[in-house]
Image (cartoon, rainbow, N blue to C red):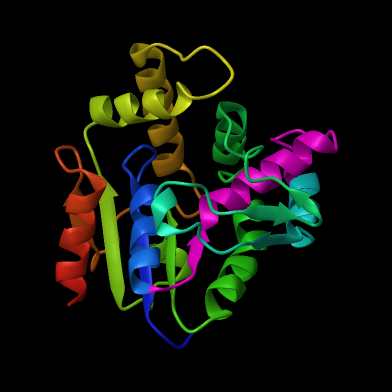
Amino acid sequence: MGGRLIVIDGPAGAGKTTIARALARHLGLPLLDTGAIYRALALVARQRGVAWDDEPALVALARELPIRFGGLPPSGEADAAQPVWVGDQDVTEAIRTPQMSEGASLVSALPGVRKALLGLQRAIGASSDGCVAEGRDMGTVVFPEAEHKFFVTAALRERASRRQADLSGGPSASPSLSTVEAELRSRDARDSERAAAPLARAEDAVLIDTTALDPAGVLALMLERLG
């Protein structure tokens, strides 16, 4: 693709979605949130009664997934979610639940699903003059040719604390920190040990530990690297 391609990978709770939004907004580039694609697939599967381990049925859904993204909200809404539609259905809020997070982790572990969505991700990324793409295999599989690659991570306890804070604003009671930490540990194992496109740092990716950094600090580091 032409233009400036910047990819950000990392585990759940490391802050990659927040920083990807901030970086895309700062540079005036579109954002490709690949996690939202898997969340949307999990949601559509649930709506149609397809189990999250039914690989053939999920592959069929993935091949026809009519997903599209809106522009980023204004800078005054720094961490507001990017609008997402599946067909005419606005799924922006529906895909941001703990259940869809779990569903996304399960469906994304299936090799056939990842293969079916690879072309879609690349097509979205190539549809404009540059892009900030975030996920777990952006620098290793989806866009290995990207000029700028970052891998963001953080200590497990810090990631769990952030995730718990995110969940506290939802309609359900917030789970305990130990529960969230256990869930993240399980997801880390699933993401890094799956056969297809496991979570891994690309050899040429810049590693950023966000444990003691706020989003502004991470953004400053990235902008310094980008020059």
Q: Position of residue 61 (x, y in %)?
A: 79, 52
Q: Is residue 205 left or right of residue 97?
A: left
The one nearer the camera, 45 or 97, is 97
Q: Is residue 107 above or below residue 139?
A: above
Q: Nearer the viewer, residue 203 or 10?
A: 10
Give the image location of residue 159, x and y in percent.
30, 32
x and y percentages locating residue 122 in the rendered image: 56, 72
Q: Is residue 158 magenta?
A: no
User: Is residue 50 shown to the viewer in this render?
Assistant: no
In which quadrant will I find the C terminus?
Answer: bottom left
Q: Quadrant of residue 132?
A: bottom left
Establish if 85 lies above or below 125. Answer: above
As for residue 44 lying within the magenta part, the answer is: yes
- The residue located at (75%, 47%) in the rendering is 58
Residue 179, quarter of the rendered image: top left
Residue range corresponding to the magenta coloring: 28-55
Residue 210, how many percent across, how many down? 20, 44
Q: Is residue 200 above or below residue 175?
A: below
For the question of whether residue 222 can be seen, the reply is yes
Residue sitting at x 67%, y 47%: 40
Residue lying at the far right of the rendered structure: 48
Residue 54 as seen in the image, left or right of residue 20? right
